[in-house]
Image (spheres, rainbow, N blue to C red):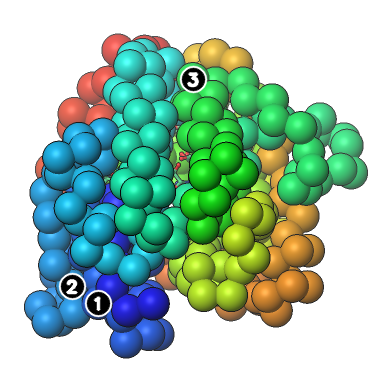
Amino acid sequence: MQRLLVTGGAGFIGANFVHHVVKHTDMTVTVLDKLTYAASREALDGLPADRVSLVVGDVADPTAVEPLVAAHDAVVHLAAESHNDNALSDPSPFIRTNVLGTFTLLEAARKHDVRFHHVSTDEVYGDLELDDPAKFTPSTPYDPSSPYAASKAGSDHLVRAWVRSFGVRATISNCSNNYGPWQHVEKFIPRQITNLLSGGRVKLYGDGLNVRDWIHTEDHSSAVLAILERGTIGETYLIGADGERSNLEVVRMLLRLLGHAEDDVVDHVTDRAGHDLRYAIDASRLRDELGWRPQYADFEAGLAATVDWYREHEFWWRPKKEATEAAYAARGQ
Ligand code: NAD
Ligand code: TDX
């Protein structure tokens, strides 16, 4: 496996993954990215030009996709519309990119017999009760709650069907909530960090008791690379690092890291419609079968490094901040 096509490689997780691949393998990487509002060309700056190239295009456009897929040994598919709140305002781009885009890539992978890895989310399993000790496993039934989660669940089903019906050499990973550098300021952790760095207030949906299972994006990258290189074709791997925290707990850590007295700058705003209560991942298959281990086991240390990163990269996030907050304000959030 030498020539890798990474869709969505200018997004948060995609760009971190491209850096990881360049650092830890000798593969060459082509990024296919539509450069939507969520993309950052800057996140690919400094990568060696003889190893990484960017093609601007749409994963749902077969004329862009087919020749590119044919020219590579493997595809890692991350391109997606990724933000739940946006999907509640307008689901249509989620269906086009996440469902039709995955279909378009799968057809090209089938035609040219190219190895395919599909990056998905734990949200396809719906949610868990707050007081339930259970975690998601690869046999948890699909039960997506939101338009975004339903679009990702649809794309997972397409991948599974293309493996079984057409013999496409594919794997799937379903990961929990990522944090780290280059995450768009619309997402929970960067939104609160940049609010606080701007002298603004934290915006917690509802009571803040919803739980997310946080993983550093670098650990997501190492897991995806392990699955790509050593995973069993047709298999689904859950990726998570035992990082369950309520949103309120995360906010309290951020307040401490940014030097605020507890809760003095927290607003409880309109809750998200259909807000999933809790996600939790059992990553045993990944650990037992592939020997994968997370490197960022200390969530608070990872969060502190992320706060520092946002302090140092205001030039990058500042231009996105005003429009993002205006959209939230219009929704009462
Ligand atoms: P992101 O929104 O930061 O980046 C998405 C990238 O895809 C952007 O660069 C965007 O320009 C590109 N893109 C969007 N539509 C496209 C199209 N039609 N054609 C080509 N490129 C297109 O998203 P992210 O948070 O980095 O998520 C990446 C993947 O990981 C997604 O598939 C998402 O479902 C999955 N995932 C994310 C998380 C998380 O916590 N963020 C967790 C689990 C899984
Ligand atoms: O301002 C906020 N206040 C708040 O309380 C925002 C933006 C979010 N929240 C809450 C909602 C969630 O309970 O924080 C939690 C995390 O929210 P998001 O960052 O929007 O993530 P989530 O909806 O959990 O989805 C994320 O993880 C799974 C990614 O965005 C998805 O792409 C991924 O599949």
Q: What amino acid is labelled 3 in the image?
A: Pro
Is 238 on the left-hand or right-hand side of 199?
Answer: right
Could one spot residue 191 in this view of the protein?
no
Q: Are marks 3 and 2 in contact (CB under 8 Å)?
A: no
Task: Say if mark 2 contacts mark 1, CB within 8 Å.
Answer: yes
Residue at mark 1:
28
Q: CA distance from mark 1 to mark 3?
A: 35 Å
Q: Where does label 3 land, which residue?
A: 147
| Crowd rating for badge 2 (residues with CA inside 10 Å; few <14, some 14–19, many 20+) | some
* 278, above or below 207, in the image: below
* Element under disc 3: helix
Residue at position x 81%, y 30% in the image: 129
Viewer-side residue, 142 vs 295: 142
Q: Residue 77: horizontal and vertical position, in percent?
A: 38, 51
Displayed quadrant of residue 300: bottom right
Distance from label 3 to label 2 (Cα)?
33 Å
